[in-house]
Image: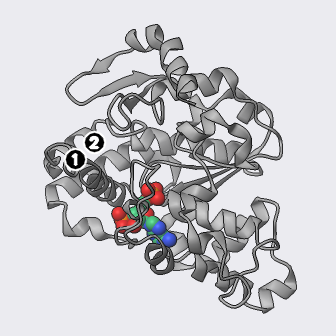
Amino acid sequence: RKAKMSSIIERYKDKVVALPKNVDHHFCKYEGFWHLQGFWYHSKADFSVEAIMALQDEFQALPTDIFLTTYPKSGTTWLKALAFAIMNRTKFKIGVDSCPNHPLRTVSPHDCVPFMESDSFLNNPSYANGLMATHIPYTSLPKSIISSDCRIVYLYRNPKDVLISYWHFLNKFKDDVSTPTKLDDAFELFSKGMSAFGSFWDHVTGYYKASLERPDKVLFLKYEDLKNGPENKVKKLAKFIGNPFTQDEEYDGSIQKIIDLCSFENLSEVNKGRKQSSKILSDDIYFRKGVVGDSFNYLTIEMIQILDKITEQKFGDLNLI
Ligand code: A3P
């Protein structure tokens, strides 16, 4: 297992050395996006540029594959849970009495749907069962994902909440390892497009444009819409991923059961305080508040104005906000 990861790092060493770098903050620029390098998992290829390069060279998508795509901290965990619960609702019936052992009641959504750029996926791609997640920017996706015509779901979240969620995550992640990042610094880097998986705005734009060009293959959802009216969006998601709810299911409360199972309250409780020895991160690091607009409790008015201005400039004609 280790050999595969170190061989990936070794294989792309020269290519990575030649990339533009920001050494102070551990970034390197690949295909127009700044990526965090050599920070998250130190010697592993997980979530690194090498992992993206290896996938670009080797990964073969099938037309039946479904990719859940997000910019980090946009609700990936939630989307994984929803898609997994929808796809597997015949096997694992929902409702406390009918399926107390539903995987989402016992393990993290990240164990149900793997990230394709993760160590475990790179070592054993077949365990994904056709449902995979990724943070890779649209333009850097392995070509076969586009050419095989498989489906892509993108979950968008407003940038201010993404930044605050990311900043908290970064500092939880850094606990005991190094000094916390100040909000000013996180803000500065985020505004310049230096964050895990590059510029938030360019990331969103790539997938958004793809959803306009190929609406039957790329579904664009918003975190805020899911929060405000989950039922319609969950129905839309189920239909898009080829598992629409039947009329009976619409009447018998199945949609609501899935929403409840995947709610922040339920999932954060299931994953509370759990750390599996094989993992670097504890399962509860993905759950903080799960609300819309928490960024207003942290950002200064000036920061808000700057972020809003960048958003306006970057998304100008896209009708995205
Ligand atoms: P906050 O930090 O604002 O609370 P990701 O899964 O992409 O890493 O994103 C994490 C963010 O999604 C965190 O946001 C987290 O609390 C929130 N989140 C996780 N599970 C959720 C759920 N079931 N419903 C709503 N939000 C959720």
**Is 175 situated left or right of 260 in this image?**
left
Do labels 2 and 1 touch, CB within 8 Å? Answer: yes
**Label ID, residue 19:** none
Q: Residue at the spot x=68%, y=63% of the render?
A: 84
Query: Camera-side residue: 211 or 17?
Result: 17
Ligand 1 lies in which image quarter? bottom left
Bin the neighbour count of mark 1 within 10 Å (Cα to Cα): few under 14, some 14-19, many 20 and up: many
Q: From what the image shows, is residue 193 above or below residue 238?
A: above
Query: Camera-side residue: 220 or 258?
Result: 258
Q: Residue at the spot x=50%, y=21% of the render?
A: 6
Q: How many marks?
A: 2
Q: Name the residue beneath numbered marker 1.
A: 187
Quadrant assignment, res 259 = bottom right
Q: Residue at the spot x=53%, y=12% of the render?
A: 11
Can see residue 74? no
Q: From what the image shows, is residue 148 above or below residue 19?
A: below
**Is 75 situated left or right of 216 in this image?**
left
Q: From what the image shows, is residue 261 above or below residue 175?
A: below
Can see residue 122? yes
Q: Residue at the spot x=37%, y=60% of the render?
A: 285
Q: Name the residue beneath numbered marker 2.
A: 191
- Indicate the position of residue 135 as horizontal and vertical percent values: 52, 43
Please name the amino acid that badge 2 sits on: Ser
Question: Which quarter of the image is occupied by the N terminus?
Answer: top right
Secondary structure of the residue carrying tag 1 is helix
Q: Residue furthest front?
A: 277
Please name the amino acid that badge 1 sits on: Phe
Q: Distance of mark 2 from mark 1, alpha carbons?
A: 6 Å
